[in-house]
Image (cartoon, helix red, strand yellow):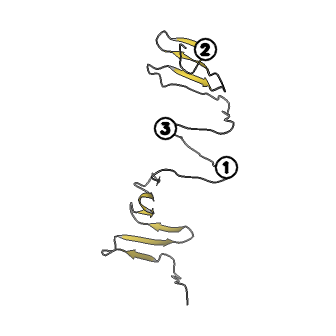
Amino acid sequence: MSELRLNTDGHIIKLGADNDVTLTHVHNTGLLLNSTMQLQFNDASQNINAPSATVLDINATDEIELNATAVDLNGTLDVSGTSQFNSAMVLAGTTPTLTIGDAGAEDAKIVFDGNAQDFHIGLDDTDDSIKIGLGSALGT
């Protein structure tokens, strides 16, 4: 026989010298990895784990790639770092709002990256005015 069968719901596989890692079959649900243990890929820096009952972490050293026709995100999206959108972006809903800035002392702007010349529109915080001009920096 070339397969291992555990033919009862709730079977537990215990791993480690002191059985500290368990993998449990949950009826009609799937597999449960105990506590805050993690599935590791390649090394410890690339893993999936649940550090609490409400958080799931997918960690990678460099990049996490999602390949699908669509990705549906329900909830708040917090992106830190540079973001790039390679197609159209639509703000939909009954009151769509795009906010640039966080009410701090800052020069908030939109830059139109042209072939030979850039243009900008933005708030110059030094005199609280709207500026439209050439270049990517306010005041140029």
For disc 3, the marked residue is: 81
For disc 2, the marked residue is: 133
Q: CA distance from mark 1 to mark 2?
A: 37 Å
Helix, strand or loop at label 1? It is loop
Please tell me which residue is depicted at 41% across the width and 66% down the height of the picture: 34
The disc label shown at residue 134, or none: none
Check the image and name the residue furthest to the left: 18
Q: Amino acid at mark 1?
A: Ala
Please tell me which residue is depicted at 48% across the width and 9% down the height of the picture: 127
- Residue 45 to residue 112: above or below: below
Q: Amino acid at mark 2?
A: Gly
For disc 1, the marked residue is: 70
Q: CA distance from mark 3 to mark 2?
A: 26 Å
Describe residue 16's horizontal placement relative to residue 84 as left or right: left
Describe residue 18's horizontal placement relative to residue 82 as left or right: left
In the image, which is nearer the foreground, mark 3 or mark 2? 2
Q: Earlier in the sequence, mark 3 or mark 2?
A: 3
Check the image and name the residue furthest to the top: 127
Residue 88 location, x and y as percent?
Answer: 69, 36
Residue 52 location, x and y as percent?
Answer: 40, 54
Residue 8 location, x and y as percent?
Answer: 51, 81
Please tell me which residue is depicted at 55% across the width and 90% down the height of the picture: 1
118 or 19: which is nearer to us? 118
Check the image and name the residue furthest to the bottom: 1
- Residue 139 to residue 59: above or below: above
